[in-house]
Amino acid sequence: MKSKNSWNLIFASNAFKYVVVILIIIVFCVLFCLSDILYGEDNPEAKGKVLATCLSIIGGACVIYGLYLNNKKIGEQTRQNNIAEKTNIDKRFGDAVGYLNSDNDGIAIGGAYALFQIAKEDERYKSIVANIFCDFISANFSSGNKIRLIGVVKELLFQNLDTVFLETELTLRNISFEKNDRFHGKVNIGFKDCSFEGVVFNMLEFARFESCKINKSHLIDCNKIDIIRSEISGISIRNLSMPTKEVNLVDNIYLGQVEIYAQTIIGTLYIGSTATSFDDDFVDKRIVVYTDCENRIEINDRCKKIVSIKKGTFYRR
């Protein structure tokens, strides 16, 4: 880019124009002096042919210079259009944020759709809009107000994780999710103080659960999973077709069974300390791991009593 700008400055300078004119004059003089050698001393048309050649050179140079000026004009017009477009999007973004915070549901829903459209049009706003939606849902979910608006925002966000909001980082707090909620796409999502009932997580880049309640939920083909200080009533973790790099279960309360189907493509599985009771009557193996790669599994000594490792990578639907 710097090189291109340097050449543009050179071409636009008066010194360059003077040099070109001087060079053209020198070339003409040389050609006229050499006309006898080029076309013969006795050729009466020698000077005319030299003149025709010079005019052709001038014409070609003018065409090239005209193309340069036209290209420069188009480039400047494109730059101005891009600036105007960005300015317009910035203004639309500011207006849309204001609409989203309106007390009128209709206006607020319009603001949500406007923000979503901006995220589709401009890569700069993809992550910004995604986090605005996350903060809005987290801040308003527990109040019980704006139910319709929250539903619209959730739909726009969760149903477009694998398209518009691909490869973004999200954080959600104090929200309850049910079986109609699905998370699909290569994004990083952090959940804190959330509850899940029959929720499916598919192909997430990184899913982190902290102080959550999880029941009858499924994590499928997620690259990395952290479940920390959470209450687990039932969950299955599977990598059916995509590699799973890492699974960490630490300081959780296991009220129901955890099923982990670890294919040979799993990186590491770490089962850390647990908050589950260890009285003498506790015989239930709460964590069941189906795998053919035991060497990639690390289990905290205090957790071995509740972990069962079984050979096999199968999964029955």
Image: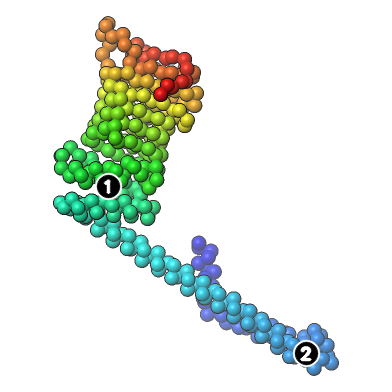
The secondary element bearing badge 1 is classed as helix
The answer to whether 127 appears left or right of 96 in the picture is: right
Residue at 31% across, 11% down: 284
Residue at 53% across, 64% down: 3
Q: Which residue is mark 2?
A: 46
Mark sitting on residue 132:
1
* Res 34 visible: yes
The secondary element bearing badge 2 is classed as helix
Residue 202 point in image, percent of width and height? 39, 34
The answer to whether 108 appears left or right of 310 in the picture is: left
* Kind of residue at badge 1: Ile
Closer to the chain start, of discs 1 and 2, is 2
Residue at 35% across, 44% down: 160
* Image quarter of residue 194: top left
Q: Quadrant of the C terminus?
A: top left
- Colouring scheme, one of rainbow, by chain, secondary structure, one colour: rainbow
The foreground one among 132 and 263 is 263
How much space separates mark 1 and mark 2, taking CA atoms?
78 Å
Residue 302 point in image, percent of width and height? 33, 13
Residue at 30% across, 36% down: 181
* Res 210 visible: no
* Kind of residue at badge 2: Ala
Residue 187 point in image, percent of width and height? 38, 40
